[in-house]
Amino acid sequence: MVDRRDSGGEGVVAPPPQPPRPQRQRTGSQSAAEVIAKPQHEADANGEEPPSPKTSADGINDAHRSSIDSALAKQVEQVTASELGIPTLLNRLKQSIASAKEFAAFLRRRSTLEDEHAQGLKKLCRANQDMTRRPEHRQGSFAKSYDEMIFIHDRMAENGAQFAASLQQMHEDLAELAATAERGRKSWKAAGMAAEQKVVDLEQAMRKSKAKYDSLADEYDRARTGESRQSGKMLGAFKAHRSAAQQEEDLLKKVQAADQVYQSHVTTLVTEKSHLLTVARPEAVKALQDIITETDAATTMLMQKFAASNEKLLLGDGLIVSPQTGLPGSTSTQARSLRDAVAAIDNKRDLDEYLAAHFSKIQPKAEIKYERNPILNPPQQQHQQATAFKATPLNMHPPQSTGQTPSTQGTFSPPGPGALSRSSTGNLQQSNQSPAPQNPPAERPKEFPNPHGRSMSHGNPLGQNAPWQGNGSTAEPKGPPKLSELSFQDSQQLPSQRPASPPRAPQEAPNSGARAAPAAPPAYGASGQGANTKPIFGIPLNRLYERDGLAVPMVVYQCIQAVDLYGLGVEGIYRQSGSLNHINKLKGMFDADSSNPALDFRNPESFYHDVNSVTGLLKQFFRDLPDPILTMEHHDAFIAAAKKEDDVIRRDSLHAIINALPDPNYATLRALTLHLYRVMENSHVNRMNSHNLAVIFGPTLMGSDPSTAITDAGWQIKVIDTILQNTYQIFDED
């Protein structure tokens, strides 16, 4: 008996039973082992090798196998030719269909698991890559090796996704095959069993007619011999008395009629049974055998394909983790293995390079010496020092303010983030609104080079100069890296950076310290930039693009930046309402001058430390657009695409319509969608998944017609939900 003791764990899949090892049989007076053990020199003496019986892989002699096969074939032929043939084949086909369905279900579940694993790994790689590229993480060789590691995992995820797709296709093929076999089984069961049942019914009718025929014949025989009268039976007791001859004649007629009925039943049975044995049964048996063969062959083939796909998956992952070098077709630029990538990290060099990058910020060493206060000098010496100071004002007088450095054309940039910006420590730098220096114009240096100032026309894309540190070097702003997906125009095209006054002629530019200096830049709003001349809210996106040269409006960029920095972990972000007073103040400031440095949302003080007011401002901007971002022109097309039941067809339809949007609409929608996807990635914290965001942004981004607002509301949510779920299929990540 087989010992079936529990191994100690529930749910453990037991290994399949191994087939018994075949025993080598002895034939005649010499066994196969003796033939193998025969001395080699005996074979060499005859010049040929000793004959050995051909043996198959399972150890069975071919001759013995042929005898077994012939006997088995005879038994199969007898079973299929009998009345057991069709029912037996139907049961066997039922087993094949059940096995195919079970394997198809296994493929579907395995495909789901592999796809979930691949998608989760992709999302993990994307999130990790975004986080490690921020300035607060290590750079250098560690960052490069980490990127290679993430890239390797991303390729493994892609390999797993392809494996899941192939399993899904195999599941669909096998399910379709099982359904076809099921239909064929039902059809041939009805046809074959009907013929069998007809013969059975005819046999029963024939037996009944034969029994009746035999009974009448016996009664006729008794009437003819007079046994019925002697037995005391009263035939026809309630009828008129008949003579024995008449009774005998009536019984004879009944016997003859029963004989004809019995003969006709036998003839019909013989005909139908002959048709069953020669036509109906062989035809049904052959059809059922073909269906069984096709089903079993397809199931086996798909199992072989599944095994090959598993090998391909594991081999592909292995080659991704550790590529083979030196093989035919391999190139010198082949990616490094995971082990080599990690081994390439040089911690010492990374630290040295990081420290060396701050070399330019080292302050020059000043010589410490004693300087006597001029008040203690004799009067004659004080007069000589004053005369020397007037002779060389340029060498002695420092620049008054780094925020008032003239541009290369001799003009001053208007008040902007460089004039009133927050340094990395949060202290305000000197602005253009500061009072003019108290020194007279004649003593103000004009040609003193300012090594720290930067013209607004050469600033960053947001029109903001980097904040200055006290030692005169630029400090990196503490905030998010520049959003690469927001394709802003060059900083020289920003209207907020145009000069507040017409440029001076070259001959009017100051060339020496003796001439009068140009007038100081006007205070904020004095030149008209503070006035409501460039509103943002309620202006179409194409007009904003033509006027400002920004693919994404500044208010959208600032709001996205603020939420990315301070709102991704806020529960109910975009659902919570901000302060209406704060929203109106921020709206007025953007309508007045979107380049106002006070609107730098990297500093939470700019939006009153209320990120919900920022989300309210962003939603207000989209609601105030005369034409929604998805445009009324394409509204019906979006609704029609949302009604597609197939997910892929619905996604591709929406993708085609989005590609047809105007450039400003497309750029703004892309920036917003990528941002909302980042919000979705933190849904475990902020509770805002794609559906919740779609409920909020559906009517906002698509607009609404009062006549169809109620009927279209659900489809608008479907549109935005589909776009968010397929963000990286519709928009490029770069």
Image (cartoon, rainbow, N blue to C red):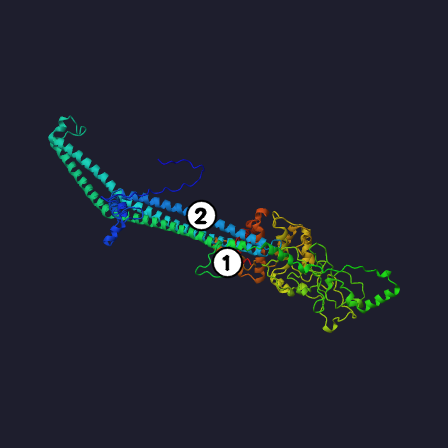
Comes first in the chain, label 1 or label 2: 2
Residue 714, image x, y percentages? 54, 51
Quadrant of the snapshot with the C terminus: bottom right
Q: Secondary structure at mark 1?
A: loop
Q: State the residue in front, 652 or 270.
A: 652
Q: State the residue in front, 128 or 570.
A: 128
Dot 2: few (<14), some (14–19), or many (≥20) neighbours within 10 Å?
some
| 386 on left or right of 712 | right
| 213 on left or right of 440 | left
Q: State the residue in front, 426 or 283.
A: 426
Residue 154, image x, y percentages? 51, 54
Q: Residue at x 84, y 61 (%)?
A: 374
Q: Which residue is mark 2?
A: 110
Spot the residue most to the bottom. 507
Per the rendering, the mark at residue 519 is: none
Residue 89, image x, y percentages? 30, 44
Q: What is the tally of numbered marks visible in this picture?
A: 2
Q: Which residue is mark 1?
A: 335
Q: Is the C-beta separation of discs 1 and 2 under 8 Å?
A: no
